[in-house]
Image (tube, rainbow, N blue to C red):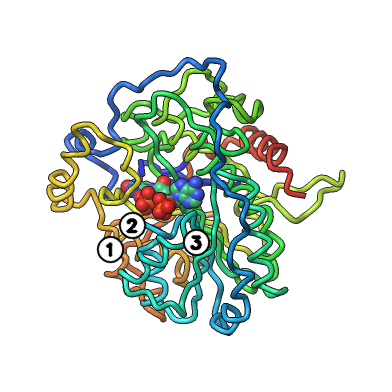
Amino acid sequence: MWPLCVAASSGLVLPAASGSAPASIAASPLRVAAHPLLQAPPAVYSPSKDLAGRGAKYYDGRPPELSQSIAQALKEVGKRKICVITGASSGLGLHAVTALTSSYEGYYVIAAVRDTAKMDEAAAEMGIDAKDYKAVKLECASLASVRDFSKELKRLLRGRGLDRLVCNAAVYLPTDPKPRFTDEGYEMSFGVNHLSHFLLLQLLMPDLKKAKDARVCIVGSVTGNKNTVAGSLVKPVADVGDLEGVKAGAGSVMVDGSRSFDGAKAYKDAKARPREGGGGGGRGKAGKPERPLFTNRPGIVFNSMYPGCIAQTQLFREKRDWRGAAYPHLWRREQAIGSYVSQKEAGERLAQTIADPQAAKSGVYWSWNGDAKSIGVGNAGGAGGDLFENSFSGMVQDEANGQLCWDYSMELVKPY
Ligand code: NDP
C-alpha cells in the first residue's frame, strides 16, 4: 500500500510506510486531526441505472501536438535524458519539473498533461526554460489518449530509450455524491490514478528497457497505507478486498466491488494497490506477458515516494467545506511543526527520486525526515542526509492480490 498523501500506482509494487514512518507522517493525534484528508462521513451513493450515462468524452480524439514540432523537439532534447512526468501542470509535478530542470543537469521533460496551454503558462510563471520541456497532451481519463500519447512519444524517441517515467497525475474526489466515469467507463479515481498509468507503463516498457539506467517512479500517498497513523485511523481506510471491482471492470464503482460509492476511499484504494509488478514487454512460457516483480526488473529501477503532505496543491480542490477555508491557517501552523511540506520542497523530493544516484535503488519507497534540499539537490547528488527507505505494508506485499490486480488490469487495458 502506498503511503496519507502516498503512493500511486501503475502496475508496480508500492512500498508502504511502516512503523518507521517519517517524522512528518508519524503524526500526533493533534496533527492527524488537522490533516486535510480527514474525512467527514462520506457521501454514499447507491448506483442507479444512469451509471454510465455521462455524455461528452474527456478526450477529444485529437492526437498530441508533438508530431507537428518533432524536429524542433528532437533538436532541443539533444543527448539529455528524457523524463516523462504525468500531471506536470500543477502542484508536485510542476515543482518537480522546476527542480529537475534547474538543479540537475541533462534532463529534458515531456510534461504529459491534459491541458498543454495551462502547462506552458505555469512553466513560464515558474521560470522553466521552454528548451527544457515539451507539453504533450495526455488525458488520463481516456485510455485512447494514453495510446495516442504513447505513439507520439515513440516518434520523438525514434528508437532511443526512455530514461524516466513519473506517474504523478491523480484526482481526489472526496465530496462527489456519485461516481464519475472515464471515457471507457471506469470510476474516475481508479481510471486516472491507476489504470491509465498502468497502461502507460505497459506501452512504454520496451522504451524503458532500451535506456541504460531507466527509472520509473510511482508517486505514493499514505492514505493507502494501513500501517501509518493516517492510513489506519483516518476513515475511510483503504481496503481493496479481493479486487472484485477491478475484475468487474467498466461500470464498477469501488475497487473492492462495493456498489456504494465513497470518493475518499476510491482515492485511497487507487493509491493502495497491492503488489502488481512492473510487467510489460516480456512473455512468459505460456506466451502470456510476464509480471516481473517490482524489485526484479533488471535494468530498470522501480520505486515509489511519499512527498509529504502538500496542503497547497490543487489536489484538495474538491473540498468546499470548512476544511477548505481552514487550510491556509492549518498550513501555516502545521508548517511550523513540520507535518506539511511546501510545493517547492515536495518538488525537490520528487526530483531527487528521479535524478539522484542515491535513489537509484529498485523496490524502494522513499520518504524524508528532512528537506531534500538540505541533502544537496545538485548535479553530484548522493550527498546523504534525510532521505530514507521506508518499508512495504502487508497489503502491498500480498502476492496473491498483486497477481490478481495485475491480471485484471492487463485484461482491462489489453496493451498488446
Ligand atoms: P494537483 O491536483 O496539483 O496535481 C495533480 C495533477 O494531475 C494536475 O496537474 C492535474 O492536471 C493532473 N490530472 C488530474 N486529472 C487528470 C487527467 N484526467 N488527465 C491528466 N492529468 C490529470 O495535486 P498534487 O500535486 O498534490 O498531486 C500530485 C500527486 O501527488 C498525486 O499522485 C497525489 O496523489 C500525490 N500526493 C499528494 C499529496 C498532497 O498532500 N497534495 C500527498 C501525497 C501524495 P491539471 O493541472 O490539468 O488539473
Assign a secondary structure to mark 1: loop
First in sequence: mark 1 vs mark 3: 3
Residue 320 picture location, percent across and down: 25, 34
What amino acid is found at the position of numbered circle 1 in the picture? Asp
- Per the model, the C-alpha gap separating discs 2 and 1 is 7 Å
* Dot 2 and dot 3 residues touching (CB under 8 Å): no
Badge 3 is on which residue? 85
- Per the model, the C-alpha gap separating discs 2 and 3 is 21 Å
Q: Nearer the viewer, residue 118 or 241?
A: 118
What amino acid is found at the position of numbered circle 3 in the picture? Ile
Crowd tier of the residue under label 2, counting other residues whose Cα lies within 10 Å: few below 14, some 14–19, many 20 or above: many
Residue 358 picture location, percent across and down: 45, 69
Badge 2 is on which residue? 368
Assign a secondary structure to mark 3: strand
What amino acid is found at the position of numbered circle 2 in the picture? Trp
Q: Residue at x 41, y 29 (%)?
A: 263
